[in-house]
C-alpha cells in the first residue's frame, strides 16, 4: 500500500513513544543491575562457604538460562509466585515493563557481579593494607579507595554488558511491552512496508550504541587521567 506522509508521521510518533519506553526500561534495569551486581561482587569476597555456594548457584543459573526464558518465567509465573509468597487473596499483577525490569536486573546483575568480583581480585593487596595502616575505616576505604579503582578496572567489561543488555531489552516486547520493536512490527504489518520500519528501529539502536560508546570513551579518559603513566 502507498504510505502517505501523514501516515508515516503517525507511525513515527508511535515508534518515538516506543523508543522512550525502551530507553526507560533499559536505563532502569542497568542501574539496578549495576547496584545489585556491585553489592554481590563485594559480598562474594568472603570465604564463607554458604555465601560462595549461593553465588555460584545464582551465577550458573542466570548466566546459563537465556534472557527470554527468564522474562517469560517472570511475566507468566511472577503473579503466582508473589501471591504464594505474600498470601494475598487478590493476585499480584505483573506488567510487561515490570517483568522486563525484574528479569533484566536479575540476569545482568550476575554478569556485573562477576566483573566486580574479578576486579577486586585483580586489585593489589597493598591497597587494602595501606588503607588499614592509615586507620581508614573499612566503609570509607571501599568508598574512597577501592571503588574508584574498581570502576576503572571493570569499565571495559561494563561497556560490553551495557551493549548486550541494550540488545536484549527488545525481547520484552514478546511479553507485550509496547516498545520501539513492537511498534515497528505493528507499523510494518499495517503498511506492508517491513523494511522501512525495521530499518528505522535498527538505526535507533545503532545511534544509541554510538552515543553510548562516545560517552564511555570520555569516561575512560577521565578515569585514567589520575593514573601515573608507566614508562618502560
Image (tube, rainbow, N blue to C red):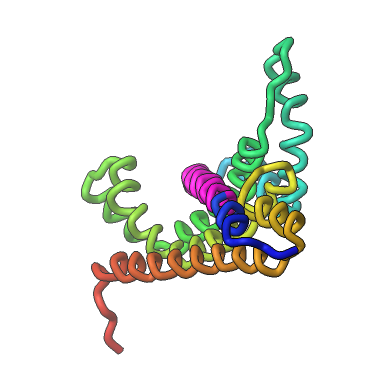
- Give the quadrant of the C terminus: bottom left
Q: Percent x, y for residue 168? A: 65, 56
Q: Is residue 18 magenta?
A: yes
Residue 3: name its quadrant: bottom right
Q: So how many labels did they put on this image?
A: 0
**168 lies left or right of 64:** left
| Residue farthest left in this picture | 134
Nearer-the-camera pick, 131 or 213: 213
The answer to whether residue 113 is seen in the rendering is no
- Give the quadrant of the N terminus: bottom right
Give the vertical position of 196 relative to 28 (above or below). Answer: below
Nearer-the-camera pick, 81 or 118: 81
Please tell me whether the stretch drawn in magenta is mainly helix, strand or loop: helix
Residue 188: name its quadrant: bottom right
Q: Percent x, y for residue 121? A: 48, 59
Q: Is residue 145 magenta?
A: no
**211 lies left or right of 30:** left
Residue span colored magenta: 14-36
| Residue farthest top in this picture | 89
The answer to whether residue 78 is seen in the rendering is yes
Q: Residue at 69% across / 55% down in the picture?
A: 187
**230 lies left or right of 12:** left
Q: Residue at 47% across / 46% down in the picture?
A: 31
Q: Residue at 74% across / 48% down in the picture?
A: 174
Q: Percent x, y for residue 162? A: 53, 59
Amino acid at each position: 500500500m502507498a504510505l502517505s506522509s501523514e501516515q508515516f508521521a503517525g507511525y513515527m510518533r508511535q515508534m518515538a513513544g516506543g523508543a522512550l519506553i525502551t530507553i526507560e526500561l533499559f536505563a532502569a534495569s542497568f542501574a539496578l543491575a549495576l547496584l545489585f551486581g556491585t553489592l554481590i561482587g563485594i559480598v562474594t569476597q568472603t570465604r564463607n562457604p554458604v555465601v560462595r555456594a549461593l553465588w555460584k548457584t545464582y551465577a550458573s543459573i542466570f548466566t546459563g538460562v537465556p534472557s527470554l526464558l527468564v522474562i517469560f518465567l517472570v511475566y507468566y509465573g511472577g503473579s503466582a509466585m508473589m501471591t504464594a509468597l505474600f498470601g494475598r487473596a487478590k493476585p499480584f499483577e505483573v506488567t510487561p515493563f515490570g517483568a522486563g525490569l525484574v528479569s533484566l536486573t536479575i540476569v545482568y546483575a550476575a554478569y556485573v557481579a562477576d566483573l566486580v568480583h574479578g576486579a577486586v581480585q585483580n586489585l593489589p593487596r597493598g591497597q587494602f593494607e595501606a588503607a588499614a595502616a592509615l586507620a581508614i575505616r573499612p566503609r570509607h576505604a571501599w568508598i574512597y579507595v577501592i571503588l574508584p579503582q574498581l570502576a576503572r578496572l571493570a569499565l571495559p567489561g561494563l561497556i560490553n554488558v551495557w551493549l548486550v543488555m541494550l540488545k536484549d531489552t527488545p525481547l520484552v516486547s514478546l511479553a507485550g511491552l509496547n516498545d520501539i520493536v513492537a511498534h515497528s512490527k505493528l507499523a510494518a504489518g499495517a503498511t506492508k512496508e517491513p523494511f522501512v520500519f525495521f530499518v528505522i528501529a535498527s538505526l535507533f539502536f545503532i545511534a544509541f550504541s554510538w552515543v553510548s560508546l562516545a560517552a564511555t570513551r570520555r569516561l575512560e579518559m577521565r578515569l585514567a587521567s589520575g593514573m601515573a603513566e608507566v614508562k618502560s
